Amino acid sequence: MANLLCRMWAPGFAMIAALAGALAAVPEASAGDTAVSITPPQSMHQLVRMPESDLRALFAASPAAPEPRGFVPGRAIKSPGSRLTVPYSRGTRLVWQGKIFSEGKMVNRVFGVGKAIPADVYLGESRADGQPALIFDYSHSKLWPEVRDEVREVAPGLYLGIMYKGKSAPEEKMFFALDARK
């Protein structure tokens, strides 16, 4: 009887051990990795509709973004993957329209105000994974001195960013997308 049980269970245990070994051998995604298990997005529309896990994987696998030039339209991505993400993004678009870039500087474009909330732009280390990212540093801003954005290019001219708030213990507030293709 024991011999019969061993013959029945052994293949199952062998399969589980093989699967565990295969999963342990899968490397973590990091900036610059080109193999992402998700389909690369082609628009802000697609980024807004992606679940949080896909946005994180895409950010981790993408390279640091070159600084865009001029006005770049943007979309907020709050609570990714929830049923409120798309309506929130549409509503936010009425107020926050994107960012305007000029040689190491950036300013947000806000409806009814025009240019608001400036930031310094430079290449730095991401808080998310320690890899290079384009940083939008608002520390000299009067309205958002504790805010910092980190951006990577997920497709040519298409950027994914993470907004952080707080100096000593920064908290991730939301994702956002920028489309520099004209």
Image: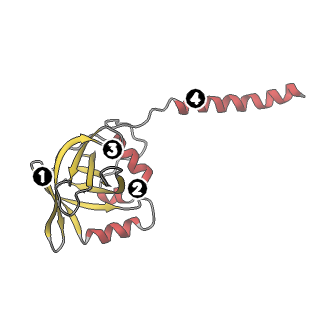
Image vertical order of residue 38 relative to residue 107, above or below: above
Which numbered disc flags the more N-terminal residue, 3 or 4? 4
Residue at left offset 18%, top offset 72%: 111
Q: Name the residue under label 4.
A: 21
| N-terminal label among 3 and 2 | 2
Q: Give the image quarter of residue 70.
A: bottom left
For badge 2, the amino acid type reads: Met
Of the numbered discs 4 and 2, the one sitting upstream in the chain is 4
Q: Earlier in the sequence, mark 1 or mark 4?
A: 4
Please state which of the two labelled residues, at mark 3 or mark 2, is closer to the viewer: 3
33 on left or right of 71: right
The nearer-to-camera label among 2 and 1 is 1
Label 2 sits on residue: 50
Q: Cβ–Cβ below 8 Å for labels 3 and 1? A: no
Where residue 87 sits in the image (x, y, percent)?
A: 37, 70
Q: Indicate the amino acid at tag 3.
A: Arg
Q: Residue 161: x and y, percent? A: 29, 52
Quote the CA–CA distance across marks 3 and 2: 21 Å
Q: Residues within 10 Å of mark 3 (few under 14, many from 20)?
A: some
Mark in front: 1 vs 4: 1
Q: Mark 3 points at which residue?
A: 127
The residue lying furthest to the right in this view is: 1
* Mark 2, other Cα within 10 Å: few <14 / some 14–19 / many ≥20: some
